[in-house]
Amino acid sequence: MALPQFTLVKRKSLVCAVNSTSGVVHGKLRSGTWRAILSYMLNIEDRKIDQQILDAPMFTKVLLEDIALASHRILIRSFLVRNDIVGQRTAMALRTAAERGVKVLIIKDRAGAMYEYSEENGQSFFHDEPDKDDWTDIHSLRSLHIQGRFLRRFYGLEPTSLKKNPHKGLLCHKNIVTIDDYKINDHSKVILIDNEIAYSGGINFGQEFDAPKGWLDFMLRIQDKEIAPKLAKLDETQLLDKELLNFIKKTRQHITVIMAYLGNPVYLNALTGLVNSGRSLHLITSKCPDSNRFSNDVFLRKLTTGINGNRQRLKISLRDGMVHAKALSRDHEKVRIGSQNMAFADDVYGESVVETNHPQAIQTIAQVAEDNTKKDIVLAGKDLESIYELCPRIHIIPAHIEETGKSLKLWAERKYRQEIAKARNKCTEAIKGFLL
């Protein structure tokens, strides 16, 4: 089958891809202009399907091997790509693949640029010249850069100077199309190779994940010609809040939650209710997360005070390093892994989630829970009183600032829904054309 040809269409300063064979993008909204954030959940019941949960260092190694073996096409949907050794190595691998004839499509959401500016080295692989944008544009990098600089100060990180990326030219090739001109609030991390291998989870392209004692997170690698392409979808809408609540409520005895960002009262009530009804919870998160820090503290305080004397059923592991994972394991029977945190409602960011009963996935989460119980601060029973020292009440005020930021994201999402919907539709149609 011949691969579709792409032409480039300008939108102000950058380019987006249009399939010129099928003419799928016309800059025109389809009927039903506004849809909720585009989220997708895949439930895999067949244990025979080739599945493997990878931690961050192993993910980078295996992904680069898969890219080296790719023969037809590579699709990447990414929220964050830093200009560091991991971003550069990935770009070099994609350039090498393109030179041997592999078609590459990269959907890079501008919304992630704020976190590229506010975390770690503060450098963005794609969005390195924000001052060229009009700050009043909904897709403006300039406004995101201002927000990122504020967050660095808010969390006490050293200011950084944004530098132009000299490596971006690696992706300038006739077989590589990058759509990085839009803020579509797609928080998913999805990779599809040759319509047969798919990755989904919480890992971004950044050196912080790849270090020996780096951020704790996972990607699920699936190798199956029928299942893998389903993860690439950007035009499915599912209410993942409801799906996540259902996953929690189906717990019969025990649930392990490894979660980066907390704060949504819906999940707080669900977990509190679970413990109070006689089931047990092991929550693993960061002692000092890179962002959402104060909302996490308030969530943990409220969880501890809301369990009505059932503290023997609650265990909290606070990791010294960053926990960036969004994974749950229920009754040692089923695992839920993806990009969905417990901080936002599901109408703020689009996410991609997989639920699986594969034994390797279940064992991996169980091993992480055991390891964190040995190494980190573990609060259980009477020790839960220490949560008041680790999460002091003064954090309530900055937590309100964090929650205000989330509310502003939701307000902007609704106010500019037409613009964002147009951008999403263009990205959706580009993916469809690419996968023809």
Image: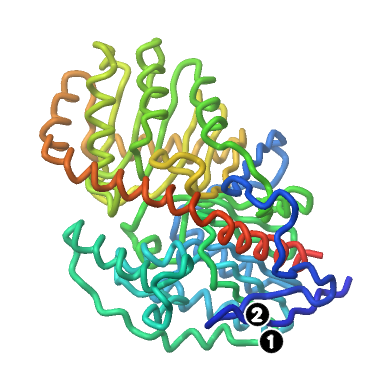
Residue situated furthest right in the rendering: 1
Q: Amino acid at mark 1?
A: Lys
Q: How packed is label 2: few (under 14 Cα within 10 Å), some, or many (20 or more)?
A: many
Residue 13 is situated, as x and y percent measured from the top left of the image, at 53, 83
- In the picture of the structure, the residue carrying the numbered disc 1 is 174
Q: How far, Cα to Cα, is label 1 from label 2?
A: 6 Å
Q: Secondary structure at mark 2?
A: strand
Image height check: is 413 above or below 108? Answer: above
Q: Secondary structure at mark 1?
A: loop
Total numbered badges shown on the rendered structure: 2
**Residue drawn at (33%, 37%) of the image:** 263
**Residue drawn at (28%, 25%) of the image:** 303
Q: Amino acid at mark 2?
A: Ile
Q: How packed is label 1: few (under 14 Cα within 10 Å), some, or many (20 or more)?
A: few
Q: Quadrant of the N terminus?
A: bottom right
Q: Quadrant of the C terminus?
A: bottom right
Task: Give the colour scheme of this rendering.
Answer: rainbow
**Residue drawn at (70%, 71%) of the image:** 70
In the rendering, which numbered label is found on residue 275? none
**Residue drawn at (19%, 63%) of the image:** 153
Q: Is any part of residue 375 visible from this angle? A: no
Residue 100 is situated, as x and y percent measured from the top left of the image, at 71, 84
Image height check: is 321 above or below 373? Answer: below
Question: Is 71 in front, or is 159?
Answer: 159
Quadrant of res 312: top left
Image height check: is 15 above or below 426? Answer: below
Are discs 1 and 2 less than 8 Å apart at CB?
A: yes
Classify residue 68 as left or right of residue 289.
Answer: right
Q: Is any part of residue 211 visible from this angle? A: yes
Residue 246 is situated, as x and y percent measured from the top left of the image, at 55, 25
Residue 17 is situated, as x and y percent measured from the top left of the image, at 68, 75
- In the picture of the structure, the residue carrying the numbered disc 2 is 176
